[in-house]
Amino acid sequence: MLTVENVAVRRANTLALEGITLSLAQGRTLAVVGESGAGKSTLIGAILGLVPCAAGEIAWAGEPVRTYRPSLVMQEPRRAFNPRLSLRRSVCEPLVAQGLPRDEARLSRLCQGLEIQPDLLDRLPSQVSIGQAQRVGILRALIASPPLVLFDEPLSALDAVTQKHTARLIAELQSEEGFAALIVTHDLGYAAAYADEIAVLKAGKIVEGGPTAAFIDRPQTEYGKSLRNAAFALGALEQVA
Amino acid sequence: MRNVIALAFCFIALAVLAPILAPYDPAAINIPNRLSAPSADWVLGTDALGRDILSRLLYGARWSLGLAFLISFLGLLIGTVIGLLAALGGKWVDWFLMRATDTFLSFPELVAAVVIAGVLGASTASMIFALTVTSWMRYARVARGVGLSLQSEGYVIQARLAGLSPLSIARWHYIPSLLPSLTVVWTGMFARAILGISTLGFLGFGVQPPMPEWGTMLLDARIHMRSTPLQMIWPGLAVVMSVLAINLAGDALRDALSERVQDI
Amino acid sequence: MTRVVFGLFLRACVVLTGAAMATFALLWHAPGDPALAVALARYRTVVPDAVLDHVRAEAGFDAGYWPAFWDWLGPLLRGDFGQSAVTGRDVWPELVTAMSYTAPVALLALGIGMALSVPLALLATKRPGSWLDRFAVAIASLGVAIPAFWLGLLLILLFAVQLGWLPAMGARTTAHMILPAVTLGLGVAASLTRIIRSGILEARGKPFLPAFLRRGVSARGVQRHHIAPHAGVPVVTVFGLELAFLLEGLVTVEVIFSRPGLGGFLVSAISARDFPKVQAVVLVTALIFVTVNLLIDIIYRALDPRIGEQNA
């Protein structure tokens, strides 16, 4: 269970995040939605321990999150891999780092789930498509069986068809593996389709949060309403509503 | 540019093959034949003790080029370690190491080397020490600069999240990215080390006679400048040619690697 | 900007303190009995132990590292560089005399370097790739590869020994300054030509220039108002490098021309193991070097507002 309590992050004398309180249970999905500059990436950094908190506490089952080694799926899949190393080396890095045995059966099961051809892993990051790279990125994030996986705009670098495909693969793997997923996205359609709960981040603060269906039906704030209406106008919410 | 690199390799080959190519023992003294002019037997003439200048030049290449290689390589190791420690070690380590680097740069490197070598007592060992401790700073700055820019790279963040040890992160993610830039700095420092060795040798603070080092040979030749001026030409020409070849090879390398070289 | 300048100043102070500590540590750990070296230099003969003890106490060698360090630093901060270990005379006046021989040569060399490099670089970049440009590049590459002392010896050989036009040894007349200054000036010219040339070529490649030309700004106007300042920024920073080059060159060049300047002063002090003198030269050189680099840093930031507040 991830708990984020009253967290504030200071950036150059202003608060990039303020009074953030969230919780996320094992196996569940929380989507944090907001516009660019709302502080989404800072929130991810704070949860991963890459950005120091000025106030508040972040814990996983009562212990500091870093001891549980949450993993991260990045927005730009290619930049998440060392351009000089084969994808296989990068994928196995968490296992090597944590001294875990290399479980070939698990690797091939995950590859199958993510529709990654086995020979793809022997290529360099520059030799695969962006969609393939993102699936390998998800593979790397899952290989060491972390209890919590953070997704930083996991679909925004992909084209529309690949987006849908990748989103479905993530959801299927989550039901098999049972990790908690925190998805940060500007795409309310994606959040509404896959998240159990939604939190709306605006200018460093959570302005609204709750179960997905309730939020889509009846947003509590003007900002939430405008986000939902914009998504409707684009047709992004049709399949949900 | 290929010719230039070939030339640089020629000098290294000359140094390695000195025992085969040299017509005489570089230390063999032949007083009756001292200060002789170039002739068929002694192609470049002989020095004040009658030693063959060509043989001494060839063996001298081993001192000048070999020690310059050693010094620039030691500087590379020290500088890379310090630069990476500064980039990875956090704010205070960075502050301390960068002020230490500034302190060593607060003084022209060669003047510092002269002081250190002279004070420690004229010997080859003090010269190596003096030129090494004054030659790591550029590497440190480059390593730190590239290190800091890599810190925000996605794959470095992933490695940190995965819990990879700092040593492994440096080994797998930093050093491969650093190598092109460091190699270019290294060629420049190699050339500087050749100049440094000959300068210290010339001042009497470097390789000691009777070893045939080019700067030391110039120190000997200077005394007999009026009677046999040619003696003074050869060692200097050897220094200039090798520095020039290495500098030009470095320029070519920089152009070839320009896409991968950062922060120079 | 004031804050940045103050930060840079503070950093320079830290660096100078570090340099002073490093110098003291080096001299303290120098091999051999410093008292014996001083006594030998002073009396030119083997002396009894009683005299050695006297020298040791007088120079403060027996007090231990930190007391000796504070003993040395205190007067130093008040501008007192102490007395020569060999002659017993004050170091400072001797240092001033040495600098009075060095400064004109260094300035003349800098002038020669500028006078040669600026026209050469401007002519060379008129038509990049022309024979003149290749010539300039070749000369510049050659110039930075020649050790200053060897160039000096060649000039002595040609102009003093063979032709007899100029005096080589000593510093009695103004004419004695010419050969050392030319020796150093040629080196300065070589590295300046390289830097100015690439500065001009880089500024030419800037995207705003074709726009100016299209708008009818004359080619000459573009050269004067837009290319020259761009080439100027690297030239300012390069003065730090040129100063380093000059100081490095002076050490050997003053030795071969037998000039009683700073370089000759340093080498003879090291050879005599006259440590107060060595310390004085080292610290004065560091002070000059750090001050000049501090000024360059400030000017650089003033010229290029983009750097402004960062890296402070």
Image (cartoon, grey):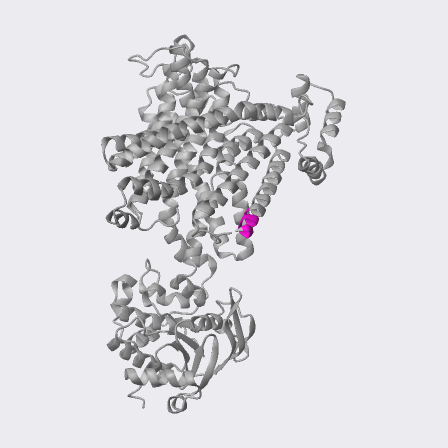
Judge from the rendering whether residue C161 lies leftward or rightward of residue A63; answer left or right: left
Main SS of the magenta part reads helix
For residue C269, above or below residue A170: above
Of residue A155 and residue A19, the one placed in the foreground of this image is A19
In magenta segment, residue C5: yes
Q: Is residue C265 visible?
A: no
The residue under the point 55% across, 29% down is B118
Judge from the rendering whether residue A143 lies leftward or rightward of residue A120; answer left or right: right
Residue A197 position within the rendered picture, expressed as x and y whole percent measured from the top left: 42, 85
Residue C140 position within the rendered picture, expressed as x and y whole percent measured from the top left: 34, 31
The residue under the point 30% across, 74% down is A111
Of residue A97 and residue B178, the one placed in the foreground of this image is B178
Q: How many marks?
A: 0
The residue under the point 30% across, 68% down is A133
For residue B230, above or below residue A197: above
Of residue A130 and residue A231, the one placed in the foreground of this image is A231
Judge from the rendering whether residue B192 lies leftward or rightward of residue C141; answer left or right: right
Q: What segment carries the magenta color?
A: C2-8
Q: Is residue C26 visible?
A: yes
